[in-house]
Amino acid sequence: MTHVTPYDRLAVDAEEMERLLASGEQARELINYFGPAEYEELADLARAARHRRGARAEQVYVVPGIMGSQLGLRREAPSPVDVIWLDPIDIAFGRLFALRHVPESRIVPLGVLPFGYLRLKLELERAGYDVTLYDYDWRRGVDELGATLAARLHARTQETVHLVAHSLGGLVARAALRALRTDKVARLVMLGTPHFGSFAPVQALRGVYPLVRRIAALDLRHSAEELATQLFAGFESIYHLLPAGVHAGAQDFFDPASWPGRGPQPVPAQLATARGLDARLAPADERVCNVVGVGQDTVTGAVRRGEEFEYIVTRNGDGTVPAALATLPGARNYYFAAAHSELPRNRQVLPAIVDLLAGGATDRLAAHWSTSRAPLVQVSEARLRRTHLRKIDWAKLSPRERREYLEQLNDPPHFARTTGKWSRAAGRVGAATGRDGRRRRGPRAGALEITLSAGDITRANAEALVAAVLQGVRPAGAIAAIDARIGGVIGRLAAQRMFSGEAGSVTAIPAVRGVTHAHTVLLAGLGSFDRLGGAALELAAQNVVRWCAQSRIRRIATVLWGAGTGISPERSFADQLRGYLRALSEGGQDSWRVVFCVPDPRQLARLARRAPRLVAEAGQAFPEGPAVTLSVRGRRRPSRAAAGDDAVPQTTHLLMHEEAAPRGMLAWRCAVLTAGRQAAVLSEVQTFSARALDTHLRSLERLTFAQLAAFGMRLAEVVLHPSVRALLHATREHPLAIVHDAAGSRIPWEALCLRGHFPAAGRGMSRRYTAGELPVARFSERRRRDGTLAVLLVTNPTGDLPGADLERERLTKLLARLPAARVTSIQGAAATRARILAEIQSGTYDAIHYAGHAAFEAGAPARSGLRCSDATLTGEDLGGLAQVPALVVFNACESARIRRRGSRPHAARLPARAERMRTHAGVAEAVLRGGVACYVGTYWPVGDAEALAFSETLYARMLGGVAMGDAVLAARRAVRALRSIDWADYVHYGDPQFLLKELG
C-alpha cells in the first residue's frame, strides 16, 4: 500500500500552487499549511501576479538555500510524489535516512519549499518579471550544482536572465557564473549567502546545531548525534559552507586534526575536497548585489576547548551567517536586520530586491552597518546537547503548533545576555512521547500562582515590575507610572535610545528607590505596533520568565500588555499566560508568582469572571507545565498614578513602509496607532501611480501660502488610504509622529492637510525612520541639567553661500539677547573638519547650528554629512566620538530626507524644491546614526524674516525647558503667522518629548 501524507499531496509545482491559491481550491489544506493570515496574503498576491504575467520579458531564476528544495522519490501516476524532505511524518518514521546515499541515490528535487520562497516569486511576478523557482539537490557539492545550473540557463533561456539566490544558492549562482563565462546573467542578487562560510555547518557536523536537534526531536528512531554522523556528514554541500581562511579564526576547519576527538566527526575526504572553494567561484562585478542580515544572535566564532568546541554568540549576523562572512568584497553590499530564513520573504527586503533587479541599487536597505556592541555569549557543546531532548508527537500537534515548529526549525538557540536583553526564543511545542509513540507525562514543573489585583503596580509585592514597550513608541501607561516613582530613569534611557522595543527583547533597570518592594524593572519588547498580536505577547512573556530564571527572580508584577492598542484584556491575559507556561514547561521545579495589576474595577471584574476558563485552556495546552492557581485580590480604588496597561500612547503614530508593486506603481502600507485610552491600530495599503506623485510634488515649486492647504489635501489623497486619512483626522487633537522608510522620506509630510487641518501646525508633527536600529544617543546628561544653552555655530564653510553669512549675523544677535545662551562661531575657511571635530569632542555644546551645504553619498548614509571647508564631517565621524551634542539644526538650502530608492525610468527631472527632497537627504540620517538625539532641518532656503522667527522661537522655548516637539511646533506657528509657506519647510526627526534642557 502506498504511503501518502498531506505533504505529498501538497508537493505540486509552483504554477499549480499559484493556481490553487488564486482559485481558492484546497483552501482548508492550504490554510493549515500556511496559516490563515499568510494564506490570505498569498492568495491576493497570486491573483495580482496572474494579471501581471507576460507584461515583462525579463526572466528571474530564484535559487533557494540549503534545504530549501523538497527532496524525495517520484511515483507512478496518478500517485503523488513521495516527499521525504521536508515531510515531518516521514521524518518521524526515520525515513530521512533515505537521503543518505548521495552518489547512487534515486532521490530527486521535487520543487522549492513554498513557505520559504513562494512570496518572493509572487512579488517579483507582480512587479512584472517571469519567475522560475529553481529546485536542486542541495546535498551535492557547489561545483556540481553550479555546473548544472549553468547548463540549465544555457539550454532553456534565449535571452539574459536575472538570478536571486538565497544562502547556499548564492554560492551555486557564483559557480554558475564562473562556468558560463558569458553575460548570460544580467544581475545577481544574493541574500544571506555565506561567501566565506558559517559556523552553522560546524555545529551541524557536531550534532549541536538547533535545526539538527529539532529534526532529531521529530525523528522517533534517531538521535541528533546519529543524524550528524550517519546522515549530514555525507552531504558534500555542508563542507563547502565551513568557515574558511581568516574568517575561521584560529581553527582550520578543513584539517581533521582541528576537530575534537570525541563526538560526531566530519569525513576527512570531504574536508579535503571542499578546501579552496572561493577560488573556484566567480568574483563580484558590477552585476552583483549582496544583502546581509544583521542584528540577530549568531555564532560568530568557535574555539576548541579540550574535546569540544565553545561557540561565541554575538548580534553580528542573521542568526545563521555572520555578517563578516556574508559580506562580499567588490559587490554592492546592503544590510538589514532580519533572520536568515526571513530574508527572502521579508516585506521590506522584497521591494529592495525589485529595485536591485531594475537598477542595481536601492536605498530601502542600509549600505553601511556598524558592529553591534552587545555583549557576547559563550556556549559550550555540552550545553547545546541538553536542548531539544524530548521527542515530539507530531500527530498530537494542532495545525498552528505544526506551523510554528517548522517555522522555528532554523531559529538560533536562546541565551541570556549580561545586559538583560534577549533575542527570539525557541519554545517547546507538543508533548513528550516514548518509543512506542504513546504520550508520556513527564514531571510537572513547580507551581504558578496567578493573582488579579486592583492595586498599583508600583506598590506590588514583587521582586520585579514588568511592563511592555512598543518599537518606536515612547513608553507610557504603566511605564510612566513606574518611571515617576524611580526618578525618571526610564525616560532618560528612552531619550538616549537605550532600549529598542524589538519583539522578544528584555531590558532590565535597577529600581534602587521609589517602588515599595521591587528591586528591578523589566521592559519587555513587543515589536512594531503594526505586527502586534498574540505571538508577540507570548514571546515577550517567555523571555521575561527566562530572564527572571537566570536572575533568581520568582515573583513578578505586571499589567495587561497592549491593552492601550485595542487588544482586549482577556486576550492580553491569555497570551501572557501562554508565554509564561511555555517557558516554565521547559524545566525547573520552582514556584512562581505573577500578579496582574488591573486598576479599572469593571475591567478587573470582567477578567475575574473569564480568567478561570482562560487558565484551564492554557493548562491543557501545556500539560507538563506548572500547576496553576488563580486568585483575585483587592477591589480598592487605585491611586491616580496607577496604570492598567502598558502602551497607551500620548501621540498618534503613522508607520509607513513601501511594498512591492507593479511597474510604474507604488504600494504604501500605512498603519496608524491612535493616541489616548481608546487607542486602536489600523493598517491599510494605498496603491497609486508613481508618476502622479512626481507630478504633484513638482507643484511644490511655485506654491503660495494660500495654495498650501489644497496641496496638502491632494497629497493625502495620493499617498494615504481613505481609512487612514479618516482616522488621522479623527485623532487630530493629538500630536502625530510619522515613522517612515526611505521611500516615505521624500514626502513633505509637514504639508499634509486633512480636511483643512494641518497636523504639523495643529498639535505638532515629528518624524522617525525605520532604516535599521539607530545607535545609542550619546549626549551629555550633565549638559541637559546645565542652565546655559551652548551652541556651536558653523556657517558658510565653502564660502559660496552669502545667505549663510546672514544666518550667522542674525543668530548671533538673537542668542545674545538670551542671557543663558553661549555661542561659539566658526565660519568660512576656518570651519575645517578637524576644527569642528575638536569643538564637538570638548563636550561643551548642546547644539550645532549649521548653515552650509549637505554632502550626500547615495547608498552610504554614514558617509553623508555636513560639508566643511576642506572635507565632509560624516555620520561615521560623529559615531567615533564619546559624546556629541543632543541637537543638530540645519537651517540651509538642502537637508532633510533619508536615502531615496533608485530612480524610476519614467521620472522627469524635478524642479528645485522637489529635487532637493530627492537628492540632498542623507544628512538627517547621517547625524542621527552618529549618535545625535534630534535633528531639525529644512528642504529649501527660507526667507530672512521666516528664519529669524523660527530660530528665535525655537531657542527661547528650548532654553525654557520646553520639549522639542512643542518647541518646533511653536516655531512653525511663528513662521505661519507671517503667512509664509516656509512654516512647512521645517522637519523634525526625533522624540517630540525630548528635553534639550531638563530644568527644575
Image (spheres, rainbow, N blue to C red):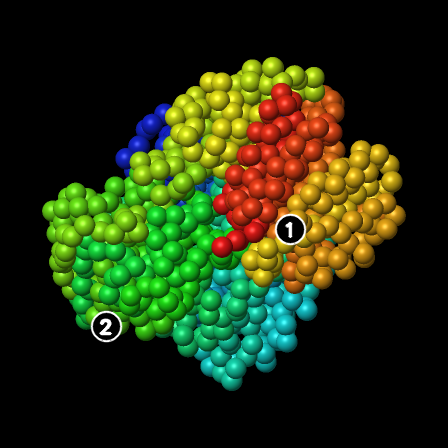
**Residue 675 percent coordinates (x, y):** 38, 37
Q: Is residue 845 left or right of residue 40?
A: right
Does 600 sit above or below residue 557? above
Q: Is residue 826 left or right of residue 260?
A: right
Q: Which residue is mark 2?
A: 590
**Viewer-proximal residue, 199 or 481?**
481
**Viewer-proximal residue, 508 or 446?**
508
Foreground disc of the pair 1, 2: 1
- Numbered mark located on residue 806 in the image: none
Residue at x 75%, y 57% (from the top left corner): 839
On the image, which quarter does residue 856 sit in?
top right
Q: Is residue 715 visible?
A: yes
Disc 2 residue crowd, few under 14, some 14–19, many 20+, Cα 10 Å: few
Q: Is residue 556 left or right of residue 623?
A: right
Label 1, secondary structure: give it: loop
Q: Which residue is mark 1?
A: 820
Residue at x 47%, y 81% (from the top left corner): 262
Disc 1 residue crowd, few under 14, some 14–19, many 20+, Cα 10 Å: some
**Residue 996 percent coordinates (x, y):** 57, 50
**Residue 628 percent coordinates (x, y):** 16, 61
Between the C-alphas of marks 1 and 2, the distance is 58 Å
Residue at x 35%, y 43% (from the top left corner): 648
Give the mark nearer the N terminus: 1 vs 2.
2
Does 151 sit above or below residue 487? above
Amino acid beneath label 1: Ala
**Residue 326 percent coordinates (x, y):** 62, 56
Amino acid beneath label 2: Asp
On the image, which quarter does residue 4 sit in?
top left
